Image (cartoon, rainbow, N blue to C red):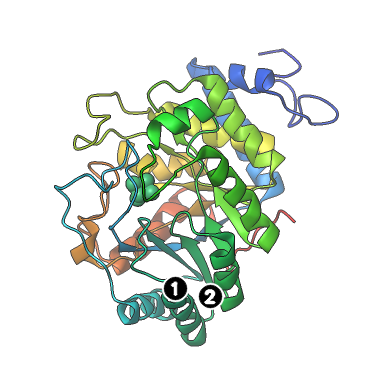
Amino acid sequence: MTDSKGLSAPYHPKNDGAWTREDIVPLLSLTGEKDLEKLFEQADRARKKYIGDRVHVRGILEFSNYCKNDCLYCGIRRSNSNVTRYRIEPHEIVEIAENAVNSLGYSTVLLQSGEDDHYTPGMIEEIIRAILERCDCRVALSIGERTLDEYRRFYDAGARRCLVRFETTNKKLYERLHPGSSATKNSFEERMELIKGLKSIGYQCGTGCMIGLPGQTAEDLAEDILFYNRHNINMAGMGPFLCHGDTPLAGNPDGTFEMALKMIAVTRIVCKDIFISATTALQTLKPIGGRELALQAGANLLMPNITPKKYRKLYLLYPNKVCTNESPSDCSSCVTRVIHSANRTVGSGFGDTLRK
Ligand code: SF4
């Protein structure tokens, strides 16, 4: 721990701050209690210095669990016939968003779904416009792969943030996990190009990896962190792999809470002013106190669910998902409690990126 690239140093391992995979892997490999404590403290200091104490909150609306893809890890993959599928009508999406902003006080609505072509580009544009006509908020999209032309239309309609996770920067692993079909190519290159393209349109771009995937190494995870900096990513949403029994990966061990926390901490130390969310998947591994620990290890975003209760149990990307019995207003009071118990303040305004 006295190495110049290690934790005894302040935030930068080298004067030019250029991190490498070799700098990051030892940090992700730490296991001793004292070393981990130091790592999380350093990340927390970096968070305070570059981001401050405010925790921004984005309300997630899971509006459709139909998906044309078959990602091996995903509970709502196309081939899982045990899923009861639902779609929320556009007018109801707008009403839910309106309630989240005008009654619960959220300043961002994140529209999330499987890759569902039922919602045409025109429908999505109309939903975005209708939300923005009624609410003073940011609209963010997490709807998977669409063409850049479509994403440009959504931007013109007013969407300003996008979340498209790369899941892993290891091309071979990515290809194993995302089998293509006649309807979808699911190519690694296209996913990466899309993420870069979203930045060029002007979106505040979120992406992220899954932590603890079968076959994934600490080197892969280090590359994932380097990707955020290389592409000036605005938000990292990382969650542990949680094994779903109705998928081809059934029987594999889950990712660990500890590794997920280390990824948050090291991402904060390396990427400084990036936004990092404490994800629901992380909370699922430690329902009590998990989000507080993430906030104390470098995270600065929470994403409570605003999906109506009747749909929540049907959007199970992974098993034992938390908050499926709660209502949007339960989740709203809960996040405020979590933020205060981590000695932080609820962010005001839109909570836009600090990375230009
Ligand atoms: S991870 Fe996303 S794209 Fe893949 S099957 Fe699940 S919902 Fe569809």
Q: State the image coordinates of residue 106 (x, y, percent, origin top left).
A: 46, 70
The residue type indicated by label 2 comes to Cys
Q: Residue at x 28, y 24 (%)?
A: 252
Q: State the image coordinates of residue 5 (x, y, percent, origin top left).
A: 73, 19
Is residue 93 rendered to the left or right of residue 140? Answer: left
Is residue 313 rendered to the left or right of residue 57? Answer: left
Q: State the image coordinates of residue 112 (x, y, percent, origin top left).
A: 40, 60
Q: Is residue 46 above or below residue 155?
A: above
Q: Secondary structure at mark 2?
A: loop
| Mark 1 Cβ inside 8 Å of ligand 1 | no
**Which residue is denoted by mark 1 in the rendering?**
124
**Residue 91: in sight, yes or no?**
yes
Q: Which mark is residue 137?
A: 2
Q: Is tag 1's residue or tag 2's residue first in the polypeptide sequence? A: 1
Task: Give yes or no for contact between labels 1 and 2 (Cβ–Cβ under 8 Å).
Answer: no
Q: Is residue 31 above or below residue 37?
A: above
